[in-house]
């Protein structure tokens, strides 16, 4: 399913639902190659993954202790180290052309983090964007992880926000290479669940607003 926010420079918003990590990578690569070959500013995928552990390009940060049976461990080309995806975690993959959006890498990262913080604030969770260590933090607890790859001005990968996931998969690794880090979720902070479908649509809207602020009403 896809949608476009009026005035967002034709930024395509897609909601594939729950998708295997490998399938999501294929979607991102196809969108990235189309951007490099043609026009447009890009596509934002908002989805969930079945349980999977992904490794970043910084091998020193890829500290997997023991992957649970049946949970794949996948090497990626994004920044950062090992992290977990599982149902109830909202994953945002902006595949966009930075030059066409007049954005540098740092500005792009900050805008995506701020969009995620905005979503959490609307739920009642005060999260702070940080560049070092990268992610969204609730005091000393990490609620969202981010890692991207940039090739010829086109971004892939993105932000993963813990909303209602159980967080148990993070115990199989040193998350993002941060010993002793405490992971949290919106549900854990709030003491109640949240609507994943509503969160996905709102996050897509906030992401579009963050990336194309001058073109939105």
Image (cartoon, rainbow, N blue to C red):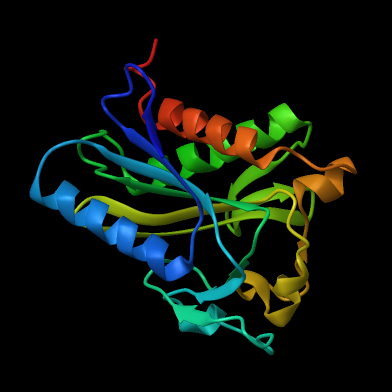
Residue 23 falls in which quadrant of the image?
bottom left
Residue 86 falls in which quadrant of the image?
bottom right
Q: Is residue 82 visible?
A: no
Residue 192 located left or right of residue 59: right
Percent coordinates x, y for residue 66 in the rendering? 68, 90
Percent coordinates x, y for residue 121 in the rendering? 71, 31
Q: Residue, x 41% and y 30% (percent of image)? A: 208
Residue 42 located left or right of residue 181: left
Q: Nearer the viewer, residue 60 or 168?
A: 168
Q: Residue, x 46% and y 67% (percent of image)? A: 21
Residue 202 located left or right of residue 12: right
Residue sitting at the far left: 37
Q: Residue, x 90% and y 44% (percent of image)? A: 191
Q: Quadrant of the C terminus?
A: top left
Residue 66's place in the image compared with 165, above or below, is below
Percent coordinates x, y for residue 157 in the rendering? 41, 58
Residue 73's place in the image compared with 137, above or below, is below
Residue 185's place in the image compared with 110, above or below, is below
Q: Quadrant of the N terminus?
A: top left
Q: Is residue 101 visible?
A: yes
Percent coordinates x, y for residue 186 in the rendering? 77, 45
Residue sitting at the far right: 191
Q: Nearer the viewer, residue 75 or 2?
A: 2
């Amino acid at each position: 399913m896809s949608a476009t926010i009026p005035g967002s420079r034709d930024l395509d918003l897609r909601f594939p639902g729950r998708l295997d990590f490998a399938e999501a990578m294929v979607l991102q690569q196809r969108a990235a190659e189309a951007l490099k070959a043609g026009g447009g500013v890009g596509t934002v995928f908002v989805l969930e993954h079945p349980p999977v552990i992904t490794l970043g390009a910084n091998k020193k940060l890829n500290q997997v202790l023991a992957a649970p049976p049946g949970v794949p461990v996948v090497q990626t080309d994004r920044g950062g180290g090992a992290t977990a995806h599982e149902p109830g975690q909202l994953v945002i993959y902006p595949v966009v052309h930075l030059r066409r959006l007049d954005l540098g890498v740092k500005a792009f990262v900050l805008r995506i983090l701020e969009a995620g913080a905005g979503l959490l604030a609307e739920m009642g969770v005060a999260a702070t964007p940080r560049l070092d260590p990268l992610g969204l933090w609730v005091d000393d607890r990490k609620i969202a992880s981010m890692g991207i790859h940039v090739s010829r001005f086109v971004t892939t990968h993105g932000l993963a926000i813990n909303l209602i996931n159980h967080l148990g998969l993070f115990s199989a690794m040193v998350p993002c290479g941060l010993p002793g880090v405490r992971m949290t979720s919106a549900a854990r902070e709030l003491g109640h669940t949240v609507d994943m479908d509503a969160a996905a649509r709102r996050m897509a809207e906030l992401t579009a607003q963050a990336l194309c602020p001058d073109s939105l009403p």
